[in-house]
Image: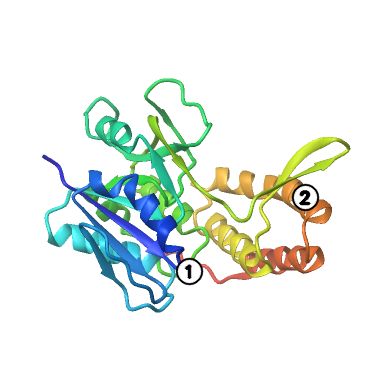
Amino acid sequence: MDKILAVVVAYNPEIEELKGNLDSYAPYVDRTLLWCNSPFALDYPNVELCGDGTNRGIPEALNYAWHYAEENGYQWLLTMDQDSKWENFCDFRDLALSGLVPEGIYTPRIFEQEVSGDFIPTNELITSGTLQSIRDVRAAGGWGTDFFLDAVDVDFHIRALRAGIKVYKLGKGHLIHHMGDVVVKKFLGKPYTTVNYSPKRLYGIYRNHWIVIRRYPEFAQHVKAETLHSYSFRIPRIILGEKDKFKKIWAIFKGTVAGLTYKINQDV
């Protein structure tokens, strides 16, 4: 039977919350690596702590896990965020490994999303909750190391597309995934949400996505469309409902300029 290795990247986690999230999937994979981007202790069955407690970002952890899986006979890698948890992970896992869905990378529907049938092709891929075969990770060349956090998943997705690998969102099980500090507000009586990313985070989001768009122009049209669309809803919501609005808008501008002027290495 195929073996699954899970990897979780954690930075200053709330330990009890992390344990609760692990409960939703760690007992149902063969082993879990918990990569420590900050110092902390955790005792959990079949979980191996790795990393040195220094914040090294996301790609180093994922590439470590990929090579660990190759060296120890795992066929699949489940990548997770510390603050994500599963509902019915076993249903997702069993469908992915059943042979009833096309070969590819499998990503979950996020809570309340609907999927017609067992799977749909998708351009939505986030690191958390994604199940990829070690063969496909190898074909994609692993995770790029020139990003620290933001767009790591987008860059990997496009590497997979270039290698002829498709991504499918599965209809069984779902992920509860947190994005920023979401707050619901109202404008003219209508509710809207803000995610309250910091200026530093907004800079990284826009810089890195524009680098991806320029690096892979033939594959990244959907990323360009989503990035441009985000200006139309994120900036008004920052102005209406968030603190430090001018710092955040300035960070978006600076990140965009940095991404558009970054020297692209076409050999990546």
Type of the residue with mark 1 = Phe
Toward the viewer: 73 or 242? 242
Q: Which mark is residue 227?
A: none
- Note whether residue 143 is visible: no
Of marks 2 and 1, the one in the foreground = 2
Q: Which mark is residue 237?
A: 2
Residue at x-position 26% and y-position 60%: 44
Q: Secondary structure at mark 1?
A: loop
Percent of width and height locating residue 129 = 39, 46
Q: Is residue 12 left or right of residue 263?
A: left
Residue at x-position 49% and y-position 54%: 216
Q: Secondary structure at mark 2?
A: helix
Q: Residues within 10 Å of mark 2 (few under 14, many from 20)?
A: some
Residue at x-position 46% and y-position 69%: 12
Type of the residue with mark 2 = Arg
Residue 69, placed above or below residue 40: above
Percent of width and height locating residue 197 = 65, 60
Toward the viewer: 106 or 182? 182
What separation in Å lies between label 2 and label 1 (alpha carbons)? 26 Å
Q: Is residue 245 left or right of residue 40?
A: right
Q: Which residue is mark 1?
A: 148
Identify the mark nearer the N-term, 2 or 1. Answer: 1
Residue 259, placed above or below residue 130: below
Residue at x-position 60% and y-position 60%: 205
